[in-house]
Image: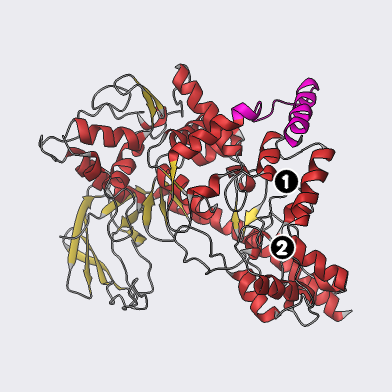
Amino acid sequence: MKRSLLMLAVALGACSSTPQRHFADEKDLGDVQAALKRDFHARGAAQMTRLDADAVQQACNLYDNEPPEPVAKKLEAEQFAKIPFPQGNLVGDWKNGQRIAQSGRGMQWNDKPGAGGGSCYNCHQLSAAEPSYGTIGPSLNGFGKLRGNSADMQKYAYGRIYNSKAYSLCSQMPRLGHSGTLGEQQIKDLVAYLLDPDSPVNK
Amino acid sequence: MRALLLAAGLLASSALLAQDVRKDVEKYQRMIADSSPAELFELTGEEVWKKRQGPKNVSLEQCDLGEGPGVLKGAYAHLPRYFKDTDRVMDLETRLVHCMTTLQGRSRDEATKRLFGNEDKPSELEYLSAYIAGESRGVALAPGRSHPKEIASYELGKKVFFYRGASWDFSCASCHGEADKRIRMQYLPVLSTPQAASQVMSTWPAYLIRNGQFKTMQWRINDCYRQMRWPEPNFGSDVTIALTTYLTRTGEGANYRGPGTKR
Amino acid sequence: MADPMKVRATMKGDTAEVRVLMVHPMETGQRKDSTGAVIPLHFIQEVQVRLNGKVALEGQISQAVSRNPVFSFKLKGVKAGDKLEIAWLDNKGEKNLTSTAIA
């Protein structure tokens, strides 16, 4: 059912006057995937299973990151259902959160398993006191100040860090929880970094 | 009110700082373009090219990089390209390994034992790449584009460039897909556009000031995939060559400026 | 045997513009290797420029200069064809020398 919905949407897309897609169809995508499996090898923690494409990657690749709304909504809901929201408090220690946000290590083939952080500053501005920040993602400066730290906002921040694709299917933000990059406490600490009034992000 | 103004001032100065950094980097690059440690790698590369090695005790001087045996002028600017003797599209590094094994009689294992060097001990391939690339100074980038395998290599490279995968769902385009974006303070060229591709491909391989090492395209692709949280690409594989083919063709026509000097 | 040096010296009006490329690790003595051991201090201490055999410029540099130094300077009162020699000595007693004629 899922597969035919996808194929129908691709076919419909092909009929309209949109620019040529990078991948003509699922077979084309499959050929590229076969080439990748042939021309890459495991190293360190980076196993070849990492190249097993899931439904999110299939859809985002097939649609050049602009899937039709029904496809996006369905897959976003599936991703959201998989987020293991902790019970109780979602706000940890912002001081630890800052360290995690600053660290660009983790999940690379030369990193020790379990070590590393979220690479947040690679893409985002966070604390105004840190000039070395990326601009691939929006600025998160003043996040808590602007949005408050209600239970709903805590849940949103937690969910967004755990799996950004649950909110925007083809977001370029890595699924830090889903991929095993960050653990529950680390994400709580990042939530604190974003929401705690004492955090440099909100000063 | 004051706290807000102060925050605004800090934000403004961050933006200015980024702009200043960009200008300073460009200024430094102009200064260093004239005399760069890259030239020393070219000099040593010439020695390696002429050195007798392997069981056959010959140098690489008869190696055919596409313009004929031993012809170096313009060879780098015309790669990757199809080679009849191997029936495949090859880039500089794969062609050099081919010559090490066929001309010099060295085993592939031995020739590829140390692909990427470090600041204290560069690899043979790094020295050779510097020398041979230097011999293409001023030649327009023109990789092979007519043979069916050259076309297939370009098409594969283009698809791989946009293919999202692995732990962080990254493709090359995840970072190199939108203008004026940066990771931390490093601006990211949109490599799928001719303007950016021509700038970038006319200045690799390059000396990297940050670690005093001379690095090649095979290394650059390898190190990108490491940071993308992918498994490791096979050296000299069709996929890695395809990416170089795609990028070089996207930047074709630009004059190759010689081994570059980068942060 | 130290790695090659490269020198470029060209006349611009009545001044020679000289650029020297050197290969040297310029270790600060602060870095540690992968085992945690300190990498010893190893840097060019003295640079000497000789014009037609006579010392024109002498300098002492420190480990603050980064790896593979690029040294540029100008000389007045010179002409094309003059012989330029650049020599360095590092803290381990290693030496290097290169020479060229001013173009």
Earlier in the chain: of badge 1 and badge 2, it is 2
Res. A139 visible in picture? no
The answer to whether residue B144 is above or below residue B168 is above
In magenta stretch: residue A149: no
Residue closer to the observer: B92 or B243: B243
- The one of B259 and A42 positioned closer to us in this rendering: A42
Q: Distance between the residues labelled 1 and 2?
A: 14 Å
Q: Magenta span covers which residues?
A: A2-28
Q: For the residue marked with disc 1, what is the amino acid? A: Cys
Query: Where is residue B257 shown, x and y percent of the image?
Result: 44, 38
| Secondary-structure class at tag 2 | helix
- Counting from the top left corner in percent of width and height, residue A20 is at 70, 25
The residue to which callout 2 is attached is A161
Q: In which quarter of the image is the N terminus of chain B?
A: bottom right
Q: What residue type is labelled 2?
A: Ile
Q: Main secondary structure of the magenta part?
A: helix
Residue of label 1: A170
